[in-house]
Image: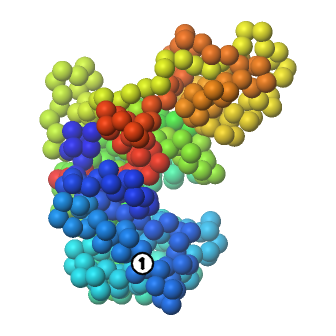
Amino acid sequence: MLKDNNISRVKLFDADDSSLEALRGTSIEVVIAIPNKMLQQMADPATGAADTWVVHKVLRYAFQGGVNLKYVAVGNEPFLTSYNGTFINFTFPALQNIQNALNNANLGDKIKATIPMNADVLWNSALPSQGKFRNDTAEQMHQILDLFHQNNCPFTINIYPFISLADSENFPIDYAFFDSDTVQIHDGANTYTNTFDASYDTLVAALSDAGYPDMPIIVGEIGWPTDGFIAATPENAQRFNQGFLNHVEGGSGTPLRPNTPVEYYLFSLLDEDQKSIDPGNFERHWGIFAYDGKAKYPLSLPGVALNSTNSNTSSLVNATGVQYLPQQWCVVADDADLANLAESVSYACANSDCTEVEYGSSCNGVLDARGNASYAFNQYFQMNSQAPGSCNFNGLASITEEDPSVGDCKYIVQIAISFASTKTELTRMLYIMQIACFSIFLSL
């Protein structure tokens, strides 16, 4: 599916061996990551943890015919303000130890360490040209930027216009997209009609202020969710992602880096039904493809001709050969006492994904109380691979072979996971991608 869609680079959020084995022998360029929870361990040179990690996760795969490793992401948004400084003192030492381990293994010229940063690492300036890094990270950022410069590593930043929209009722919605001519920011001779350019140039200015005006930049994550919030719809996701692709592939760059190609990773390939929803219900719905590898909306990717046989003219190619569990669903039993549903529904939702029935989501207002409960039961049933006993709920549920979906509110049937049969390679790959969480880069 990756190759069919001309996806030549992927960004993982860990270094899971199953994911790396699946990518072995392909030409796909891969970013692997060290989770934040491992930063303290990697920061201590006395333990040799960074060297050991590089041996097991890099050297093990970085050979001809192995995995085409490009970057090691050290943490993910470790300076996020909501972390209250938890990782701030471990991040640079971990970065230094990992890059040193890569250099000592004679891989430093080929594989670079980087740190995906949230845009909140920047001071909240009114104008892009006034961009600076936050004062509370100044010492650490100086060390990080110096290491990046010495090793020719890129600065990686995650940019989310959707989050800006979701966090502010007064945010001008068209400013999040790329099809408006309305100027929202006048910054000297430069003007800005979209959030991305302004955010990107704020980083450019901050790097210049810190003494690194030419440091390469990677957009580590950018995208738009399709559910879990009023503005999170397939239509808006298509509008944003297609607009973004057209914008950056046009080659015009941004006002502070004109005519400069933008390296980027679209977030994300598939939905993540177990991701934390603390920031919002939309967090589980960033995928361009649904859980089973079916495209959610039309999207013309760079380097891929439009599919003239597809009525929606999408160039996206769905996964083929995906195997599903039996076509059956778990619903509220006909004789169930609705007064006794609440506890069972709460349990089902706590152990599955019910974000689609929450306010502003695709199933909200579409289903009645019984339908909402059935949706929750089925999510639990499918997440447990239709295991015996997972559709009971103290006698309140039963299995049906009649699809209970209503319009765009779909009751899923889980993909079949078989690690024993070679016939289900695509299905296993989809399962791995759901767990690992991919971002995608579309090659120029």
Question: Which quadrant of the structure image shows residue 301?
Answer: top left
Q: Residue at x 23, y 61 (%)?
A: 66
102 relative to 402 in the view: left or right: left
Considering every residue shown, the one lying at the far right of the view is 339
Considering every residue shown, the one lying at the far front of the view is 420
Residue 66 visible in this rendered orientation of the protein = yes
Viewer-side residue, 187 vs 153: 153
Viewer-side residue, 233 vs 440: 440
The answer to whether residue 186 is above or below residue 169 is below
Residue type at mark 1 is Thr
Residue 222 visible in this rendered orientation of the protein = no
The answer to whether residue 408 is above or below residue 211 is above
251 relative to 369 in the view: left or right: left
Q: Residue at x 45, y 44 (%)?
A: 434
Instruction: Return the x and y of residue 397 as percentages of the image width and height.
Output: 71, 19
Question: Which SS class for mark 1?
Answer: helix
The residue beneath circle 1 is 52
Q: Residue at x 51, y 25 (%)?
A: 412
317 relative to 193 in the view: left or right: left
Name the image quarter holding the N terminus.
Answer: top left
30 relative to 40 in the view: left or right: left
Instruction: Return the x and y of residue 276 as percentages of the image width and height.
Output: 60, 50
How was this image coloured?
rainbow
